[in-house]
Image (cartoon, rainbow, N blue to C red):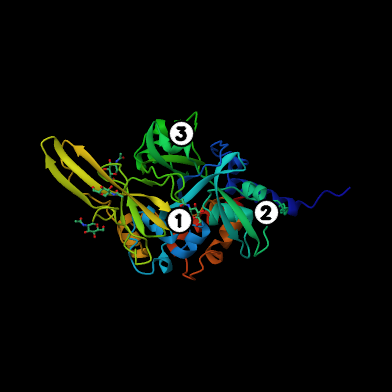
Amino acid sequence: MPLPSTPLHRRLLPLLLAAVACTGPPGAASKPALLEPCASATTCPALLSYTLHADLKLADLAALFAADPLAILAANAIDFAVPGPAGRILPAGLALRVPVPCACSGGVSRATSARYVSRPGDTLGSIASRVYGGLTSPDWIRDSNGGLTAPDGAVDAGTALLVPLHCACFGGADNGVPAVYLTYVVARGDTVPAIAKRYHTTATDVMSVNDLATADVAAGDILVLPLPACTSSFPTFTSDYGLAVANGTYAVTADRCVQCSCGPANLELFCVPAPLADAACSSMQCGNSSMMLGNFTLVMTGAGCSVTSCGYGGYANGTILTTLTTALKPLCPVPHQFPPLIPPPTSSFFETYLGPSPAPMPSEGGIKSPTMAGTAPTASPDAVAGAPPTGRHFSGVFRVLALCLVTNVLW
Ligand SMILES: *[C@@H]1O[C@H](CO)[C@@H](O)[C@H](O)[C@H]1NC(C)=O
Ligand SMILES: *[C@@H]1O[C@H](CO)[C@@H](O)[C@H](O)[C@H]1NC(C)=O
Ligand SMILES: *[C@@H]1O[C@H](CO)[C@@H](O)[C@H](O)[C@H]1NC(C)=O
Ligand SMILES: *[C@@H]1O[C@H](CO)[C@@H](O)[C@H](O)[C@H]1NC(C)=O
């Protein structure tokens, strides 16, 4: 009986081994991410940390997450008063916080749902890791879209997919302090202490929030990180009920008529008319006074400083609710300080502020699957703007590819 052809064997075995070497240990991709169990239908504001894998128009980024382009800018303290923000091209490698409503998916676990129409060459794997930066998994997308059966994860172009993404609420608090949770995909070289430091929290807290027994994390793991936040107490019938804004950032609400900010000095939500508010916005004057949203008056009395302020009370049926409150404080507050805004990032901004040396990492898809990495430089399925991806960004992908090719040759 003839043996199977050895040449074929010789070619296949190294390929297989190289594939294993280049995809990481089997099973790594399916490591269960933290899921916040949930039962109620309540929704909370949450943030997703997302690193652009290619130059991307703000409008296209917003569409990926069904988010408002202005809200994305505001959540990153990027000047949102600039004209035509949605048409701006954001540079590859930029890490942004995307504000999303975090709901209870299937009454089981916390998730936010995005909708994605697949493009030629997409697979469940590339959608999960490249398009959505590892914030979801191929299996989870498959489970959320009943009819997908292709075993290799291939998806016909033009298929409308529901893409569930991890998020967390944890009651809007961390250790009793108001917090907004940021979903974070661990990058190569990340450690829990380094991540904790970057987000001004402690490794212990990150471990306890994520129910980690050890501080071992691997690239692609999903963590949720509590960010100190300002919370609101709007009535439940308002459309922005539960609004919470992370320290140092903004939110745009009430049909873009009102902006609310948090910090830097204190964690009290501070709302004023938004820069783009126009005549179509309902009145922002506090009833029975001449004060507008954000105005306050100080009157020194024998007992202290009487502070009367016109605050925001939520958005209901197209009406901006205002609340006039008077409080007696021992000292008059200093004038309000807003969180600093940065100009919209461009490629040159990125070089200047973050330095060219820590080259952004290629998406996990680029690392894990040589096939995907091979298509990465040309496919850019969601870089609709047509801006070519920067060579710098993809050099990492090529290095990984080269490594895999070398591995193959050596074998
Ligand atoms: C809020 O942010 C400011 C500026 O980054 C920082 O100085 C302050 O400590 C932060 N507050 C909290 C409670 O984290
Ligand atoms: C307006 O202010 C006057 C005088 O302070 C008060 O009598 C009246 O009840 C107020 N009206 C409303 C709607 O708050
Ligand atoms: C009151 O608020 C409006 C809108 O923010 C602002 O334009 C105006 O300068 C404020 N007036 C005072 C006295 O602070
Ligand atoms: C909003 O408007 C609808 C219809 O006009 C009405 O039924 C509802 O009670 C209103 N809600 C509030 C909070 O005013």
Location of residue 359 by image quarter: bottom left
Given residues 172 and 293, the one toward you in this image is 293
Residue 1, percent across and down?
A: 89, 47
Q: CA distance from mark 1 to mark 2?
A: 44 Å
At horizontal 59% and vertical 52% (from top left) the residue drawn is 163
Given residues 34 and 13, the one toward you in this image is 34
Given residues 25 and 198, the one toward you in this image is 198
Does 8 sit left or right of 251 as displayed? Answer: right
For the residue carrying disc 2, how many other residues have a C-alpha within 10 Å: few (<14), some (14-19), or many (20+)? some
Q: Secondary structure at mark 1?
A: loop
Q: Is mark 1 within 8 Å of ligand 4?
A: yes
- Residue at the disc numbered 3: 209
- Residue at the disc numbered 1: 317
Residue 213, percent across and down?
A: 50, 28
Q: Secondary structure at mark 2?
A: loop
- Residue at the disc numbered 2: 153
